[in-house]
Each structure stands twice: as structure tokens, then as C-alpha cells.
Amino acid sequence: MSFDVPSDRRYLESHEWALETNGTVRVGITDFAQDELGDVVFVELPDEGESVTQEGEFGIVESIKAVSDLYAPVAGEVVAVNEALFDAPELVNGDPFGEGWMLEIDPDDAAELEELLSAAEYEDQIA
């Protein structure tokens, strides 16, 4: 099976993606992750203003099959949360790289993104 892995992002081995835009880092889970989870029924996310650490837990995603922890790709302050997911968690399944994004982080050190997997490295991991 082939999964969408956009080349404009970086990836964690735990299946989160990170996209730098205008100085912040938008975060979500990958197409592979949402497929493995099945139908997402609940997402728990931090509040704006909370701090996250690189590879530290920031929330959970719950599906009909499993509950999975979510990990931050970079350390920093949460500056936006996708509140649409609270009423429509299925957006994570339908559009994991778009409408299903989870949060935005103002990174303490944007260079942390370079430590993450490239799209090609992530594709190798899930192959």
C-alpha cells in the first residue's frame, strides 16, 4: 500500500509531521498513522500558551482501535490549536496533512527540524 508523504515536511519516527510556515511549526500525524489507527473518534490537545519539549508528549489521538500518544517534533510554545478537531476528529482521517492538522508551535530552536526524518527517510521507515 502506498501512503502520501509530502516532501515539504519533516517527520518523527512516531509518525508526526512538521511543516515550518512563517516562523511557526504546524504539526499533525501522517497518512500512515491515521490509516494504522483507523477511524479517529477523539483528539486531546494542549492549550495555547503551553510549552512542549522536543519528542515530548503533547496529547493523544483515540480511534475505534487504539489510543496513541502524540509527540512534538520541536520544543516551544503552542500558539494555535486546531479546535475543529474537537467537534470533527475524523478530519485527521480525511485530510491528515491539511484540515486535520493539530497544533502550531513557536519553536525555541528551528534547527531542531533538521534533526527530524526527511520524507525519503520516513518513506523508508514505513516501507
Image (tube, rainbow, N blue to C red):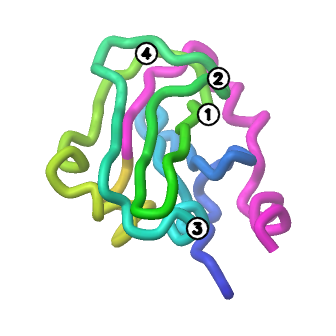
Residues under labels 3 and 1: Cα distance? 20 Å
Q: Does the CB distance between marks 2 and 3 fall below 8 Å?
A: no
* Tally of numbered discs: 4
Sequence order check, earlier mark of 3 and 1? 3
Nearer-the-camera pick, 106 or 69: 69
**Residue 120 rendering spot, x and y as whole percentages:** 79, 64
Tell me the mark number nearer the camera, choosing from 4 and 3: 3
Q: Considering the numbered disc 3 on the image, is that residue within a helix, a strand or a loop?
A: helix
Structural crowding at the residue carrying mark 1, measured as other residues with C-alpha within 10 Å and reported as few (<14), some (14–19) or many (≥20): many
Residue depicted at 62% across the width and 23% down the height: 56
Name the quadrant containing residue 97: bottom left
Q: Does the CB distance between marks 2 and 1 fall below 8 Å?
A: yes
- Residue that numbered label 2 is attached to: 54
Q: Is residue 115 magenta?
A: yes
The range drawn in magenta is 102-127
- Residue that numbered label 1 is attached to: 73
Residue 28 vs residue 116: left or right?
left
Identify the disc placed on residue 77: 4
Tell me the mark number nearer the camera, choosing from 3 and 1: 3
Name the residue at the bottom extreme. Answer: 1
Residue 121 vs residue 1: left or right?
right
Name the quadrant containing residue 55: top right
Q: Considering the numbered disc 2 on the image, is that residue within a helix, a strand or a loop?
A: loop
Q: Amino acid at mark 1?
A: Pro
Residues under labels 2 and 1: Cα distance? 5 Å
Residues under labels 2 and 3: Cα distance? 23 Å
Identify the disc placed on residue 36: 3
Residues under labels 4 and 3: Cα distance? 29 Å
